[in-house]
Image: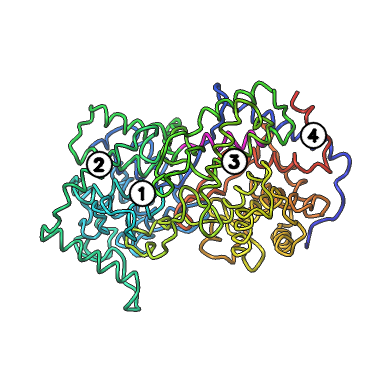
Amino acid sequence: MNGISAEPIAQALTTSLRQAIARGQQGLFARQQADGHWVGELQGDSILESEYILLMAFLGRESDDRVRKAARYLLKVQMPGGGWGNYPGGPAEISVSVKAYFALKIAGQDTSSVTMTKALAVIRQLGGAEACNSFTKFYLALLGQTPFDNCPAVPPEIVLLPQWFYFNIHAISAWSRTILVPLSIVWAMKPKRELPAELGIAELFLEPPSVIRPPHPPTQTRFTWTNFFLRVDRMLKRLERWRLTPLRPLAVRRAIRWMRERYVDSDGVGAIFPGIVYTAIVLRAQGVPDDDTEMIWAMKQVEDLMIPEEDTLRLQPCLSPVWDTTLTLIALADAGTLPDDPRIVKAVEWLLAREIRRPGDWSISNPKLEPGGWCFEYRNGFYPDMDDTAMALIALARTGHAPSTQAAGAVMRGLRWLVGMQNSDGGWAAFDRDINREILEKVPFADHNAMLDPSCPDITARVLEALGHYGYRPGEPLIDRALRFIQNTQDRNGSWIGRWGVNYIYGTWQVLVGLHGIGADMQSPMVRKAVAWLKSVQQFNGAWGESCRSYDDPSWAGKGDPTASQTAWALLGLQAAGEQNAPEYKAGVRWLLETQNPDGGWTEEPFTGTGFPKVFYLKYHLYSVYFPLMAIARQTPLAASPRAASN
């Protein structure tokens, strides 16, 4: 590795290491909530603030002071070139930029200002407002800027289709389901608020906004699934114009019932921003007044995602308490915090109280499996997920609480649930089993790049890591099936793609840790190839970094501004592979020690979390605290016991 010294870490660094671990512990405990849990900010791109303003305009509330504050935040994050991107440092993105421009205009921004004229030029250069994705077009239609016919048809009749039908509501991902069912009601009712002409955005279109066009351009090859579904889209719209939709009233009622059923045990439909926002839109379309308890509840779910500051307002896509709490517990355990520390005990009690014991959407295809597991948010009872369940089981094991009487039942239910959710290909997905019908990615409203929920290496490996803590080893059929999936998904360069974190560094770290967790051969060619790749992408300063750009262009794999979280992932992967004495490993530890802040965390600006690859990215504000703490605390050959640091 060029530019990295092979000089061993000196004994003097052991003292620095202990001090860094102590600062990390203290920093995490300082961030603990009164009831024992942790939750950091979950930051997305500017579509959250833009869509909030567009929602408020649809509801006739654009004069609300929070609209102006959200607009000021949009101005704050505008790129120097005039557009808005879906991650810091990335290129301007058409849908993100159109929504921001429209939101600013609604909020009163002068269109002759430099801000708006630069944005207008960028948007037109990117293809104009007609080049937006499906969900953006729905916002434009709701506010009278484009006909609903330019949106893809989302017929509510899909909720009536039986499970055996190839395309049914349970054949798509859980997060798409929570968006598309409310959206289908919007499609059926086509509510619209006509804005004053001066707030319109006709200037963003290259052709007149009223021109009817397909929701997506057809492919040049005539016979493709994309073109087939575009023809289906045209047919559905004709049937509506001819009033040949006899099941429409029943379908709308069923969709509304489906949506309201998922209010139960939930912080909004799906407990995520799109489902929450479309709930409010559906209620308004039905004529539910602002002072109705249901509308008040729906808007409270939006307000709970807000982070107000002095003169700005930003929103989170959802809240991440279970995720942050489990990872913090693991980091504190790695750092030597004792199991009977009252703060750990309180956090474990909080976590156990969040176990989900009710059937959910996953039960439709797996009805005999006993509920057990955890979700990402505070309350999302229909949608526990494999990632959080695995992480909770790891946290309970690492803190030493798994065998306790209090935790044993939840642990056994969680293990059975994970085992029962394994996919046919041997891997694990996020929310469901075998949501992998690739043809459905070609339907016109699938351009959010998240229609399916297939197996992915990072979650599969995290489940393996969790199972490894409870005695699962190679030779058992389910483990061997998972190992074959891992082998089959390794990239030629030795890495694995990361579905839920950026990106190849994330996937490779998790696979190495998962393989180590089940006692796999860490000298196998597969592992050695992954180790070589991690070393090859280390930067001259000893750190690692990778841009979200690597999802669009794999040549960016392992390349980007250095970050503490991605450096920690690389170090944890190398540590799992037995590379603690490698010069690359020591240089990475040294970089973390030299860049830690006095509050125990690290400064990190880039987004390193993934929502929808190529579409939506995230910054977890606690990633730069607990992951680096894990990395510096786990490399035992270099550190004396850190337990004293917790005193």
Say which of 155 and 623 sits in front: 155
The type of residue carrying mark 1 is Arg
Q: Is residue 108 visible?
A: no
Q: Which numbered disc flags the more N-terminal residue, 2 or 3?
A: 2
Relative placement, left or right, of 473 versus 31 is right
**In x, y percent, where is residue 127?**
34, 65
Q: Main secondary structure of the magenta part?
A: helix
Q: Which numbered disc flags the more N-terminal residue, 1 or 2?
A: 1
Q: Which residues are magenta?
A: 319-330
Residue 194 against residue 222 in the figure, above or below? above
- From the image, tell me which residue sits under label 4: 18
**In x, y percent, where is residue 349?**
57, 25
Alpha carbon distance from label 2 to label 4? 56 Å
Whether residue 159 appears in magenta in the rendering, the answer is: no
Alpha carbon distance from label 3 to label 4? 26 Å
- The answer to whether marks 1 and 2 mark residues whose Cβ atoms lie closer than 8 Å is no
Which quadrant: the N terminus?
Answer: bottom right
Q: Which numbered disc flags the more N-terminal residue, 1 or 3?
A: 1
Residue 151 against residue 47 in the figure, above or below? below
**In x, y percent, where is residue 535?**
73, 59
Q: Which mark is residue 256?
A: 2
Q: Which numbered disc flags the more N-terminal residue, 2 or 4?
A: 4
Q: Which numbered disc flags the more N-terminal residue, 3 or 4?
A: 4
Mark 2 Cα shell of 10 Å, populated few (<14), some (14-19), many (≥20): many
The type of residue carrying mark 3 is Met
- From the image, tell me which residue sits under label 3: 391
Relative placement, left or right, of 193 versus 132 is left
Residue 111 against residue 533 in the figure, above or below? above
